[in-house]
Each structure stands twice: as structure tokens, then as C-alpha cells.
Amino acid sequence: MTTTTDTGLARARRGLAPGGPGRPARNRASRLSSQTTKTYFWLILPSVLLLLLINGYPLVYAAIQATHNGSLIEAGDFVGFANFTEVLASAAFWKAVQFTIVFTIVGVFGSWSVGLGLALLLRTRIPARGFFKVLLLLPWVVPIVVSSTSWNWLVASPGSPTSALFNALGLGTPLFLADPTLAQVTVCVFKVWISFPFMMMMSASALTSVDNTVYEAASMDGATRWQQFTGITLPLTARSTYISWILMTIFCVNDFPTIYLLTGGGPVDATTSLVVYAYRKVFQDFQTGPGVAIAFLMTLTLVIISTILYRQIRKSSVE
Amino acid sequence: MSTVLHTHAEPAVVSTAGPRKRRTVSEADLRGRWWRFALILAITAVVLVPIFAVVVLAFTPAAASTTTGLTFENFASVFDKTLAGTWLGNSLMVTMATVVVSVAVAAPAGYVLSRGRSKAVSGYSLLLFVMQSLPIITSIVPLFILFANLGLADNLLGITIVYVASTMAVATWMMAAYFDSIPASLEEASWIDGCSVFGSFTKVVLRNSLPGVLSTAIFAFLLAWNDYLVAIVFLRSNEVFTLPVGVQSFFQQNATDWGSVMALAVVMMLPPIIVFAALNKYFSVGGIGGSLAGR
């Protein structure tokens, strides 16, 4: 305790004001270091333990499984990289890779453009704006089990308004979930519907940091709306945009329920993404080795990509 | 210091906004406002169609039924036919436990992330980011085997542990982002008064962090309440199902009995909507970005 008082007194004698907001100053941190470090250690310990046990341990175990030919119950024999070569040689795997890429690109940029558009619209003066802001978050708040059930009814049930609408337009009855291409489109639209509120929230919070006077100055100089958007809005919110793209990429690649609950990966595997493919290998074909190998390949790719991007963001925030 | 600066800055902002408000609104301005209102109203209506559909179907009597108009029949029958009551209880229990434990673990970790400046702390931040990007499918098989050996598979405690772990990264960033906004001078004052680092964290920092805590709690609530993948892998018997698994299994068996399915769906979507409607002003995901980039 005496160290604390000393520091306080010493700072007072030197006429130092208490530190500003956020991070403490370095010199104080070094004086208090031993006591503080100890407390920090205990404060962060539960989180570290949980992370090691629930995330770290399974990863090691998964590496073992990926190199064995076991099942859910038995370990099996060591087969080296046989699971990986088997997976990489199969056409179904590359088909899943393809759909995962399409799904992710549409998911990220679709939800971002819708979310940003709505965030910009809701920034202007509109009656009952707060009400709309909350209502538009509902697709993200409602459980996917519920929304997928509802979408199932809307697009695939004969009595639904969607089929009535398409009939009335003379387009017949499109098989939204039974036709491979249409099913892919439907799943992607469903993903955008679920995810745009998250992007809307990210964009809205980034937009609050942009000073309105910048726009006023720009419009006085005769900048058009589009010029203001590309010249002011996009660059000033760039960092937050990159972060939201990264997060959404991770969400899309790892997304299981959105696809599985709507189509189950079908028809004829058209909407099988890597996660769905891995899930089916493990829990329906009981091929743990190849299933985990797929998950492992995904993990490796995502870890590499996210580590690089994470460094990139940190670098851009230091500048 | 900064608080003082802040209160000075506030009136300045108000005074520049004041005259603009008082300026008479031009005709074109007003018309534009109503056009945008119509536009957003139309968009919202289209976006919410799937949610309206759930509600309408839930209150529409079944084809075989003699009642007309709106009815609660579907709710009565679904609670009668299935273990919906038990599922609802399970979901509530698991979610509440996840919320409490995840805030209790993430808040101290977030504090260290916010105030600590060592290499180890920023290394941990990177580790959280990597863990967040791992597909849960990688860890779920090993976890299932581990938990089965410990008697935690097909068990509510088991999935609660997994949920808490899966909230960790985002919950810690959210807490750290909020703690960043609390001036360090507050703690320093309490240290001078002889408070320990831990004491000032609980008594000074945490006490001033209600919005941050609520935001994290809402996030944990949504994750635990809405999860499907962990529940479908871990839970095997009807009595321990949570609502997502319950709704899905019921839907697969009664795919044409839309009224009952949707009644159960309404029961499931009500709690998150209520929580969000009540606490939405505290919820912010924007902080995550700053928190991610700032360390």
C-alpha cells in the first residue's frame, strides 16, 4: 500500500494531474508493476483457463483425430496425412469450397451494402426513426431456428404468399429449395437477411464518429452526394469497415445453422458448405478422421488469414 | 479531467444545434422527410415478412379445427403434445447461467486487456482473436468425447460450459472497450485512498460500467438462447432439449402442422425480443472494432 501512497504523493509534488482517460501512463505502471501484475494475473486467469480447456485442448485432440482413422468411439490407427490427401482429392470437398466462397462473398458484401445503406438512411431526419432502428434489428435477434422455419414456410409451402405472388405474376411455382441454383440463391439471401442488422449497427456506430461539419463544408464546395459518399464517408469509416468485413467473413465461413436448417446442405449437395460437409462426415457418415481433417483445413486457413488481417488493422490504427 | 472537459464540450454542441432546429423547415425538406419515411416503412415491412408470418400462423386455427378467427389453440396443443414447458425451462436456465458466468469471467479479463500494457496482454488479445475465428465444428467433436467421459454430454451443465467459452472473445472485447472509456484517474484516486488494484476494479470501475456489463450480458444471452449447433450435438434425450433442438425436432415430425410449429416458434422468439426491446439502448457492437484494433 505504501507504494501506492508514495506514487500519489510524488505525483502531487511534481504537480502531475491524474492520468487522462483510458490507459494509465507508463511511469506509474512500472512503479506499481509487481503488485499490479499479480492482480492482473489473477483477474485474467479464469478466462485463460477456460480458453485453454474449451478451445485449446480440443484443437490438440482434433489434430490427433485428423491423423487417425478412428470413429466417435475409438481412436483408430495412425494414418499420417491420409485423411487430408483423401479429402483434398475428393470432388465433393472442392464443390463445398466453391459454395463456401460464394456464400461468404455474398454474405459479407450483401449484408454490408444493405446495412450501410440503411445506416445512412437512418442517419437522416425521419419520423419515428428510433422505432425503425429497433425493428430492423429483429432478423438478427430472432433465433435462426425460428427464422429458418418461417423461411421454409414462405418459400417452400404451397399455401404461402410467396408462391401466390409468383403465380399471380405468371412465373409459375419456382422450387426455391429444390432447384440447386435457386436453393443457393435462397440460402445466400437468407444469410444477408440475417446478417445485415449486425452490419447496420457496425456502420451506424462508425458513422457517429464522422463530424457533420465535414459534409456541410463539402456540399458548400459543390460536392455531389456520391462524391461525399466516396470521398468522405467511405474513407473516414474505413477501419471499422475492414473490421466488420473480417468479422463477417469469419461468421460466414463458420456458419452452420443458416444453411443446415434451411436446406440441410441439399439439394444434391448444392448448398453444402465446408462446415456442413464436415458435420455430415462426422455425424452422418461417422468418418471422424476426414471430417475433422476438413475442419482443420478450414481452421488453418482462417487462422492464417485472420492473423495477417489482425496485424494489418493494428498497423493501420498505429499510423 | 476528461469529464470536466466533456461537460464543457456538451453545451457548445447544443448551442450550434439549437439555431438549426429553430430554423423554419423548408417545404422540400419536409417532403423529403416523408419520402424517406415511406421508403423505410416499405423496407421494414418487407424485411419483417418472415416474422409476421410466424405470428400470424401461430394464431391461425388448424385446418381441422372448428374455431375461426384468432386462437390460442395452437399454443395449448403444442404445450400439451410436447415437452415444450421443460424445453423452455432448460433454455432459460442455460441462458441465465451463461450470462452470469460469462460476464463474471469476461469483465476481469477485459479490465486487464484495457489497462495492461505488457507483451503478454497483447499476445492474449491476439489469441482471443484467433480462437474467435476457429470454427466450432473443429472443437465440438473432441469436446463431445471429453464431455461424454466426464458425464457432461447430454447434460445442461456441459452445454453451458461450451456457451461460456464461445462468448469469451467477444465478451472480453466488449468489456475492454467499455473500460477504455472510463478515465484511469478514477482508479488512481482510489489507489491514493489506499484501495488495492482489485478493490478499485470492483468498487470503482465495475460499479461505473453498468452499460458495458448489460451490453455483454445481452450478447451472451443471444448466443446461448439462439445456439443450435452445440445443442444438437450434445443433447440427445427429449427431457434435456433446449428450445432450438425442441422446435427443430418437432418441426421435422410435424412439418405440415404449421400452427403448432409456429406457436412454439413464437414462444422461442419472445424472450430475445423482450430483452432487446427493453435493453437495446445499452447494446453496442461498435466498440468491438476499436477494442480489436486498439491493442
Image (cartoon, helix red, strand yellow):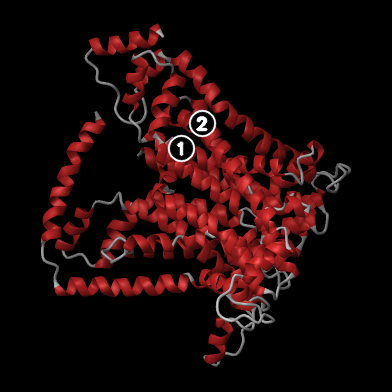
Chain under numbered label 1: B
Which of A17/B198 is in front? B198
**B130 left or right, relative to A268:** left
Earlier along the polypeptide chain: callout 1 or callout 2?
2
SS label for mark 1: helix
| Residue A58 in the image, given as x and y percentages of width and height | 71, 39
Front-most of residues A225 and A212: A212
- State whether residue A33 is above or below residue A203: above
Return the mark for residue A291. none
**Quadrant (top left/top right/bottom left/bottom right) for the C terminus of chain B:** top left
Crowding near the residue tagged with mark 2, few <14, some 14–19, many ≥20 C-alpha atoms within 10 Å: many
- Quick check: A69 left or right of A315? right
Residue A274 appears at what percent x and percent y? 68, 58
Q: Give x and y (percent) for residue B233.
A: 74, 52
Mark 1: amino acid: Met
Determine the residue positioned at 44% across, 20% down.
Answer: B199
- The CA span between labels 1 and 2 is 8 Å
Which residue is at the front of the view, B137 or A156?
A156
Q: Which quarter shows the N terminus of chain B? A: top left
Which residue is pictured at 46% across the width and 30% down the height?
A: B111
Task: Give the secondary structure at mark 2.
Answer: helix
- Residue in view at x 37 percent, y 17 percent: B191
Q: Residue at x 42, y 27 (%)?
A: B115
Amino acid type, callout 2? Ala
What residue sits right under mark 2 in the picture?
B109
Q: Which mark is residue B175?
A: 1
The image quadrant of residue A160 is bottom right
**Can you see residue A314?**
no
The chain ID associated with circle 2 is: B
Tags 1 and 2 in contact by the CB under 8 Å rule?
A: yes
Q: Is residue B270 left or right of residue B34?
A: right
